[in-house]
Every structure is written in structure tokens, then in C-alpha cells.
Amino acid sequence: MKTTKDKVLSRLANRKTNLKKQSVKLSLINELDYEYDTLQDELDRLSYTTGEWFDEKYDVWFDIGRDIYDVYFNNSEGFLEPADLVDDLEKLNEIKEKAEELGLTTLDVYPEWPMHVSQIEYLTTLHEMFERQKQRFEDESRSI
């Protein structure tokens, strides 16, 4: 099988073309925005991105997104919420009231009272953070 070069040379030999009369502007090659080697590098990068990289990253992104969605929207972890502890907080306040009526402190009646109330307050703080993260994920998901 003849190469392109061989074909061109055989035609030139058959036609006896006078190359001196041919004017070829080789400087046009220098005006190319992307030379062959540079273009090949760019094609290789794009080929890798579309052929392998995207599928790998998409699968990771999808799995992580699914995990986040399950926790934040499907309640897969079943976290406590402040609403779950409304009755407990009322009872803790009642303990405080009754203790004061008896002239006692909450520590006398229920030594863990301050920490128990503090934990409920902390739960509220964490729940607010959870809701902000949920909103952030929802907002970002819409922008993609």
C-alpha cells in the first residue's frame, strides 16, 4: 500500500511538474492557532475527560449526592429534633418550679438538670445548622 507521500511523488514524476513555478505559502503554517502536536494534546485531554474522567466523577458525585439527600431529606438517620423534646423541656422547667417552691435548687432535686437543659439547647443549635445545610444542598442542587 502506497503512502500519501509516495502517491504525491509518483504523480509529480508522471506529470513532470515544474516546482519552481509553484508558489506555496509555507508561512501560513506558522499562522495556525493550534499546531498539530498542540491540537493532539488538547484532543487527548478532552478524550480522557469525556471517555473516563466524567463517568468516574459523575458516579462519585451521584453517590455522595444520594447519601446527602437520604440524610437531609429522607431522614434516613432519624435524628432527634427540638420538637421531640418539647415535653421534656416543659418537665424540666416544672422540676425547677417545684424545687423552688420547696426552697431547693434544681441540683438538689435533679443534679443533671443544667446539663440536660444545655443538651436540649445544643440540639436546637445543631438542628438549625442541619436545616441551613439542607437548604444549602437544595440551593446548590438547583444550580447544577
Image (cartoon, grey):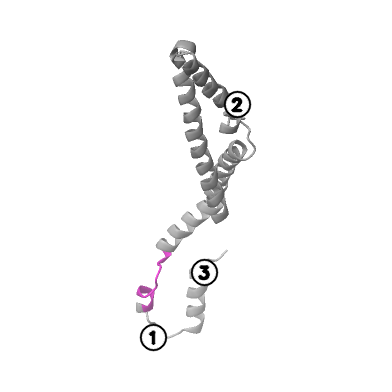
- Which residue appears farthest toward the top when viewing the image? 108
Residue at the disc numbered 3: 4
SS at mark 2? helix
User: Do the residues bearing badges 3 and 2 touch, measured as CB atoms within 8 Å?
Assistant: no
Q: Where is 36 relative to 8, above or below?
A: above
- Mark 1 vs mark 2: which is more N-terminal? 1
Splitting the image into 4 quarters, where does residue 78 fall?
top right
Check disc 2: other Cα within 10 Å, few if <14, some if 14-19, many if 20+: few
Q: Between 47 and 78, which is closer to the camera in this rendering?
A: 78
Q: Where is 63 relative to 79, above or below?
A: below
The range drawn in magenta is: 28-36
Residue 134's tag is none
Distance from disc 1 to disc 3, alpha carbons, whole Å, reads: 21 Å
Disc 2 residue type? Asp
Image quadrant holding the N terminus, namely bottom right
Front disc: 1 or 3: 1
The location of residue 56, given as percent across then percent down, is 55, 44
SS at mark 1? loop
Residue at the disc numbered 2: 87
Disc 1 residue type? Ser
Q: Is residue 83 magenta?
A: no
Q: Is residue 34 magenta?
A: yes
Check disc 1: other Cα within 10 Å, few if <14, some if 14-19, many if 20+: few
Residue at the disc numbered 1: 23
Distance from disc 1 to disc 2, alpha carbons, whole Å, reads: 95 Å
- Mark 1 vs mark 3: which is more N-terminal? 3
Disc 3 residue type? Thr
Residue at x 55% of width, y 41% of height: 60
SS at mark 3? helix
The location of residue 136, given as percent across then percent down, is 51, 47
Image quadrant holding the C terminus, namely bottom right
Residue at x 58% of width, y 39% of height: 72
